[in-house]
Image: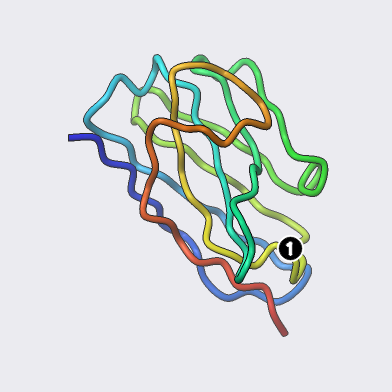
């Protein structure tokens, strides 16, 4: 069955960095756009970033642009989110997500991981 397993979350001070990873299995990873969606405490889901199936197109939400970098390795079926200059507002559960089509800004993804907690606090 489809599995998306995130790792790399944790507690970091403001201004710090974290790298999230997602291991995918059970579907044609290289044929799907992949992304990250987050949910802050008490708030709704928020789209973060998306990368096309071949990795040639990337889009970021304005609130993470210039600080986060999304990448993928289709040989290893992995997705990565490098997060720099983290702010308290970045705190939340980060979900690895996937779907057939590249649609920036849309959170209607077909596949979802279980999420990993990121906490930015001093």
Residue 9 sits above or below residue 48 on the image? below
Farthest residue to the left: give it.
1
Q: Along the line of sight, which residue is nearer the eye, 95 or 10?
A: 95
The answer to which quarter of the image holds residue 30 is top left
What residue is drawn where x is 75% and y is 39%?
61
On the rendered structure, is 50 left or right of 95?
right
Locate the C terminus and report the quarter of the image it occupies. bottom right
Percent x, y of residue 96? 46, 44
Q: How many marks?
A: 1
In the displayed structure, would residue 45 be above or below residue 32? below
Q: Residues within 10 Å of mark 1 (few under 14, many from 20)?
A: many
Residue 72 lies, in percent from the top left, at: 49, 30
Please provide percent x and percent y for residue 19. Answer: 56, 54
Say if 96 sits above or below 10 in the image.
above
Identify the residue shown where x is 65% and y is 43%: 48
- Farthest bottom residue in view: 122
Q: Secondary structure at mark 1?
A: loop
Residue at the (78%, 60%) spot, across then down = 85
Q: In the rendered view, how is the structure colored?
A: rainbow
Quadrant that contains the N terminus: top left
Say which of 37 and 64 sits in front.
37
For residue 94, side relative to residue 121 (left or right): left
Query: Where does the image place residue 79, in percent across and percent down from the top left?
Result: 46, 37
Residue annotated with mark 1: 86
Identify which residue is drawn at 57% across, 36% down: 107
User: In which quarter of the view is residue 16 placed?
Assistant: bottom right
Q: Decide which of 95, 122 is in the foreground and name it.
A: 95
């Amino acid at each position: 069955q489809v599995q998306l397993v995130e790792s790399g979350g944790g507690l970091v001070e403001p201004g710090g960095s974290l790298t999230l990873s997602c291991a995918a299995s059970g579907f044609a990873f290289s044929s799907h756009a992949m992304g990250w969606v987050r949910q802050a405490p008490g708030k709704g889901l928020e789209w973060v970033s998306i990368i096309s199936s071949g990795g040639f197109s990337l889009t970021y939400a304005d609130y993470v642009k210039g600080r986060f970098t999304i990448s993928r390795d289709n040989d290893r079926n992995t997705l990565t989110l490098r997060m720099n200059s983290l702010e308290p507002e970045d705190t939340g559960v980060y979900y690895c997500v996937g779907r057939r089509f590249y649609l920036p800004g849309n959170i209607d993804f077909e596949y979802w991981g279980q999420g990993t907690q990121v906490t930015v606090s001093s």
